[in-house]
Amino acid sequence: LLLETKLHQALKQDRLELHYQPKIDLKTDTVIGMEALLRWYDPELGHIPPDRFIPFAEECGLINDIGVWVLHKACAQARFWNEAHNLTLRVAVNISPIHISTSSFVDMVCEVIAETGIDPHLLEIEITEMSMLDYTEDLIDTIKQLRALGITISLDDFGTGYSSLNYLKKFPVDVLKIDRAFVRDIVPEKSGIAMISAMISLAHALNLQVVAEGVEEEAELNVLREHGCEYVQGYYFSKPLSVDDFTDLIVNSV
Ligand code: G
Ligand code: G
Ligand code: MN
Ligand code: NA
């Protein structure tokens, strides 16, 4: 209960923070967007990682309010960066399967778009593969409506859930994010390369673009490039950055 009270207060008092990890286009080697990632620092408890408080927020019912806050904050920030630096960065927001399954989700997104003035083509929603597990026709409908608005939909953590290729056929997504567990396995002379190569081919055969997560080494980058992966994210380029540090990054790379 203590944690719930603290999280509730942090949300109400605007003490949650977003960090942004750049996404790099391998064709141009430029930053084309960023993923918003939640950070929570509590004066008594210290830094609490999202891996811990997101599942908790999903259990105690705070996840929908958090999702709205994140979406609003990330869209406003992206709009600001794009206006201030004459850019077209696309911001990606992680949305909980619980939240996206609420009936008012699309209306809420429309409100946030109107309030922040973001071009919906510069907004991406990441949903985890887990969301598809017990999907409903309503969820497919929601995704279709979001895409009709111009929003990009990515399937996050691909390969880690109980992925069935059947889901991929049913789900109208734009981007497949290969989980970093597979990127980590890219070592020459290992089956890791075969896996990555097959995943990229599968995505392309389904007209999906590919983001590889957790790229830390040049050798991994080279394999991904060679196999036609479009975008990468990872410590090799940058860890998730505070607003100030991300601003420095875009100022210095334009
Ligand atoms: O950097 P990292 O520790 O930030 O994030 C860990 C995990 O927490 C991510 O894989 C992601 O699934 C989840 N996460 C981070 N930020 C958010 C957010 O804003 N909303 C949701 N639903 N999950 C998030
Ligand atoms: O939403 P998702 O599960 O994809 O969140 C991305 C997670 O991966 C975040 O926790 C982020 O901090 C982390 N991350 C991003 N880049 C790297 C990387 O290069 N290596 C590792 N180990 N983690 C990373
Ligand atoms: Mn993600
Ligand atoms: Na992921």
Image (cartoon, rainbow, N blue to C red):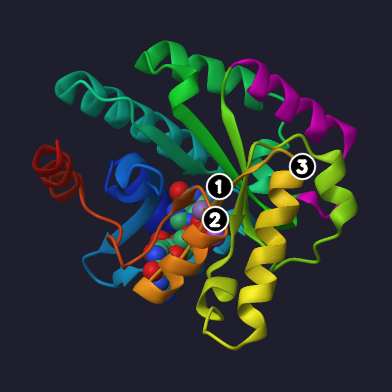
Residue 97 position in % (x across, y down): 68, 47
Q: Is residue 221 magenta?
A: no
Task: Check residue 101 in the rendering and tell me which mark sits there, or answer none.
Answer: none
Do the numbered discs 3 and 2 sit on residues whose CB atoms are within 8 Å? no
The alpha-carbon separation of the residues under discs 3 and 2 comes to 34 Å
* Residue at the image point whose x is 52% and y is 84% from the top: 187
Query: Callout 3: helix, strand or loop?
Result: loop
Residue 224 position in % (x across, y down): 51, 63
Frontmost of labels 3 and 2 is 3
Residue 121 position in % (x across, y down): 49, 21
Residue 81 position in % (x across, y down): 22, 28
Write down the residue under mark 1. 63
Q: At label 1, which amino acid type do we have?
A: Ile
How many circles with numbers are drawn on the protein? Answer: 3
Residue nearest the observer in this picture, 84 or 195: 195
Ligand 4: image quarter = bottom right
Q: Is mark 2 within 8 Å of ligand 1?
A: no
Residue with the most extreme front position: 226
Task: Check residue 206 in the rendering and tell me which mark sits there, or answer none.
Answer: 3
Q: At label 2, which amino acid type do we have?
A: Ala
Tell me which label, 3 or 1, sits earlier in the chain.
1
Hey, which quadrant is residue 139 in on the image? top right
- Judge the density around disc 1: few (<14), some (14-19), many (≥20) Cα neighbours within 10 Å: many
Q: Is mark 3 within 8 Å of ligand 4?
A: no
The alpha-carbon separation of the residues under discs 3 and 1 comes to 32 Å
Write down the residue under mark 2. 57
Q: At label 3, which amino acid type do we have?
A: Leu
Residue 53 showing in the rendered view: no
> Is 173 positioned to the left or the right of 7 in the image?
right
What is the chief secondary structure element of the magenta stretch?
helix
Residue nearest the observer in this picture, 244 or 249: 249
Q: Is mark 1 within 8 Å of ligand 1?
A: yes
